[in-house]
Amino acid sequence: MKIWFDMDGTIADLYGVENWLEMLIAHDETPYAIAKPIVNLSVLARLMNKIQRKGFEICIVSALAKDSTAEYDERVRNAKIKWLANHLKSVHFDEIRFVPYWYTKNDVNTGTDVLFDDEERHLEKWTGTAVHASKMIETLKAIA
């Protein structure tokens, strides 16, 4: 079984970056690079690693910018990968998927997967177990 984590608004506080929307509209990937963590990442990393040792796959599914170009998408992907490498160094992700903004994240679901996300549209369409980001740590503790 796979456990999928959204990034923006779930583990990275993209929306807390000053002028984040204006920067994204201008095709500036900086907000993705400088977003602060939303949760205690040492706790999150320990839980992810513990759950992974139990046989779960730990995965990222994160949307790219809404109005984008192929070149901007590549810069956003690189910023997000670097963010993960800097903030969750001890976690080996089994899969990382960056998807178009309009993408239905449920398309990555094998049917029984878990998704942690802050957006209702993704949670509502998920056919596995969908958990709001605000309940992420307590849910992971229960799984671990």
Image (tube, rainbow, N blue to C red):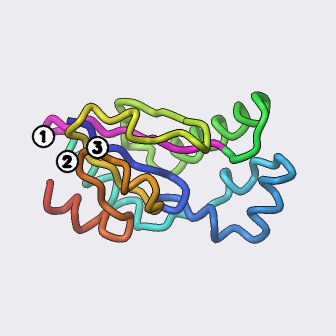
x 35%, y 30%: residue: 94
Q: Image quarter for residue 134?
A: bottom left
Contact flag, marks 2 and 1 (Cβ < 8 Å):
yes
Precedes in sequence: disc 2 or disc 3: 3
Residue 50 is marked as 2
Amino acid tagged 1: Lys
Q: Residues within 10 Å of mark 2 (few under 14, many from 20)?
A: some
Residues tagged 2 and 3 counted as in contact (Cβ below 8 A): no
* Quadrant for the N terminus in the image: top left
Q: Is residue 95 above or below residue 58?
A: above
Question: Disc 2 on helix, strand or loop?
Answer: helix
In this picture, residue 43 sits left or right of residue 53: right
Q: Position of residue 29 (x, y in %)?
A: 75, 47
Q: Is residue 54 left or right of residue 94?
A: left
Residue where numbered disc 3 is placed? 3
Between 115 and 11, the residue placed more toward the observer is 115
**Which region shows up in magenta?**
53-64
**Is label 3 in a helix, a strand or a loop?**
strand
Alpha carbon of mark 3 to alpha carbon of mark 1: how far? 12 Å
Residue 83 sits inside the magenta stretch: no
Q: Earlier in the sequence, mark 3 or mark 1?
A: 3
Q: Nearer the viewer, residue 14 or 42?
A: 14
Dot 3 amino acid type: Ile
Q: CA distance from mark 2 to mark 3?
A: 13 Å
Q: Is residue 82 left or right of residue 88?
A: right
Please name the residue that numbered disc 1 is placed on: 54
Quarter of image, res 91: top left
C-alpha gap between disc 2 and disc 1: 7 Å
